[in-house]
Amino acid sequence: MATFLYRVGRLAFRRRWYVALVWAAVLAAVGLGALKAPGAADEGFSMPGIESQKAFDLMEQRFPGATADGATARVVFVAPNGQKVTAADHRKAVEDTVADLADGSQVASAVNPFQAKAVSKDGTTAYATVTYKVAADDLTDASKEQLEHALEEARDTGLTVDAGGSAMADGGGAGGTAELIGVAIAAVVLLVTFGSLAAAGLPLLTALIGVGVSMATILALADALGLSTTTGTLAMMLGLAVGIDYALFVVSRYREERANGRAPQEATALAVGTAGSAVVFAGLTVVIALAGLAVVGIPMLTKMGLAAAGAVVVAVLIALTLVPAFLGFWPNAVLRRKDRRPGRTEEEAKDNGGTRWARFVLRRPLPVLILGVVGLGALALPMTSLQLGMPGDEAKPTSTTERRAYDALAEGFGPGFNGPLTVVVDAQGDDDAQAAAAAISKDIGATKGVVSVSPARFNEAGDTAVFSVVPSTAPTDEKTKDLVTAIRGERPGIESETGATYEVTGTTALNIDISEKVQSALVPYLIVVVGLAIVLLLVVFRSLLVPLKAALGFLLSVLASLGAVVMVFQEGHGAGLLGVETTGPIMSLMPIFLVGIVFGLAMDYEVFLLSRMREAYVHGETSHQAVTSGFRHSARVVVAAALIMIAVFAGFIGESDSMIKMIGFGLASAVLLDAFVVRMAIVPAVLALLGDKAWWLPKWLDRILPRVDVEGEALTRGADTPEPAPADQEAARV
């Protein structure tokens, strides 16, 4: 591996113009394809194999066109204190507003609340449902402005007017602000680490090129592969983070080789052969973790994982080809000024912060290990009370109209009104479908926790009925989950009595089913991803204990980060500092996101840090000396890489969307804990306690495993300081 990548780096350096032109052509081609490609169609969320999805599919089959994916807006009218919306002047204002809303060119219908009996019992609150002919993503600016204008005019009459629903979505996802913040902090970290504008700018430039290629490719293929508008969010986040990190490791190793007297071309080739090998295997672990998201069985999550894996592959390819090509253009610009003088060689055994920290841990391995494990364990404790769900409008800031509409409906109609259950009755084999549906409706209505049941609506064939059930508790309340379980538990008895069957769906039931499926998929996902990564690390480090230690360390950090997420977003500790106004259940996909993404990133630091230790150990140093050598060469760069990752992810905490905020916080805290507690403290402490046993491998396993030479032993076996080649001498003068 190292020898092959050495040749790749040397070729990229010598043929730098060709490499740069190829990447420019790729970027131009995919960019043009993205511009010409039709817009990505948002296919909606689906999860095969769960009851709520089966019920939704049955509705689409039996009620063709009734479940069309048109946008909706629910406009809520609240009368001033002591007044009622049924008063003549308020009623006229509401009806005028509904009439204005119905005039929109994209509006299919706007239902008058007084005709639909959508008025609260106390008469203070009413709501009108506006249905559009197109999906939320296809709403024009004119339609959105018309909705906003109608709301403003209604407010002028003295009513409190707010709206929720898919039509109010801003097309969100992470905007450009989060990425700009992350890039700005990354630039500062790189400048401090390298002390050179060129060295700081090169990883940023190549990472942005990689993100450009990845995002343009996703947009170009969105329609053909059925990718949604949200698919690229994770790819952008990860592509930027790993793109900077991978380039950072190659540039850092190049500077080290130049400081040791290597000529530019040779230093570039060695950097790609050694650090590039670590990049390849680190990238592979990330790709394994992301591709493994397919195990969960959520099509959207699978597409997001594969798209992000593609972005990581692009980042690896750029680190192995474009970075050495740019080093060929500016071989001296990335060096410190004092290192640019010809023939200057830096002293090898200089102490730095990394060596001092390593020696501190080596002297006190047991206390450091105990402190690290106990600290992470304490942070992980809140995980025991983890509640999963899918936060909706109730999790948005009170400054948003969606949140105010949610609160008004909950106050006027009860907390369960915002999350009604939909029951689909399949009476295809029953002689009297109406009687069967009536019996099922009556039994479910008598269930404890049910406030009301709507009249059943039949399809044209008369063999399928649909009715709504309003719970007494909020959509994210645990009692609502118990109610869904209870209604489904009554099914065998009701089916035997009526001869018809039914299923429960709706947004609330769907979120409950997703949470349960994600929880059941978490253990198989962990086994697949961790198992494959252990095998990969076994090949890289040729050690039995190092991969196992890496996996256990990861589990500690991911559990601790999940505990931190629960502590802030569910229990509310420090929530105000992050702009979290409402606490509640943790997003159902959060554990999977953390396990998949953080595992891949944690293995990045493991490979980069341990590969230098393995390299030193293979070249004859003792186990303790190898730990010190690894920290001397890698600690500063690993710290910089972790800070960059944290900066990129933390930038998303500033987003208004609660789910993006939660993902950003979870990933940032996980990288912080894994890099600084696990990799920088627990790992050297365990290696110090294990000694030479850390690098032990059974002989039979040693014979089976392929040799990949990630430490670059074949590259350094011959000449320690090769003579500069003519091309190198010419480049050195640049």
Image (tube, helix red, strand yellow):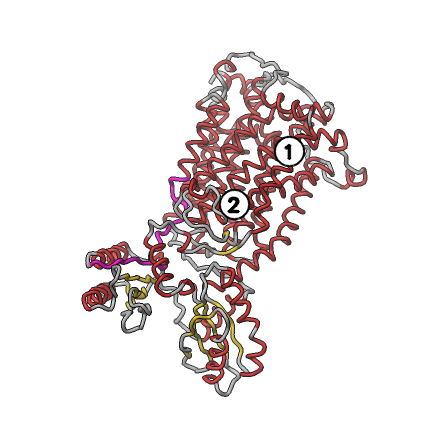
Q: CA distance from mark 2 to mark 1?
A: 21 Å
> Where residue 403 appears, x then y in whole percent?
36, 54
- The outermost residue toward the front is 82
Q: Is 31 within the magenta?
A: no
Judge whether residue 321 can be spotted in this image.
Answer: no
Q: Classify residue 523 as left or right of residue 623.
A: left
To which quarter of the image does residue 412 belong?
bottom left
Residue nearer the viewer, 729 or 319: 319
Q: Is residue 29 above or below residue 106?
A: above
Are dots 2 and 1 in contact, CB under 8 Å?
no
Residue at 48% x, 27% y: name it.
190
Q: Is residue 172 above or below residue 547?
A: below
Judge whether residue 400 can be spotted in this image.
Answer: yes
Q: Residues within 10 Å of mark 1 (few under 14, many from 20)?
A: some
> Where residue 208 appears, x then y in whole percent?
44, 36
Q: Which mark is residue 567?
A: 2
Q: Which residue is mark 1?
A: 371
Q: Residues within 10 Å of mark 2 (few under 14, many from 20)?
A: many
Amino acid bearing label 1: Leu
Residue nearer the viewer, 540 or 194: 194
> Where residue 670 appears, x then y in whole percent?
55, 40
Locate the N terminus by quadrant. top right
- Which residues are drawn in magenta? 158-178
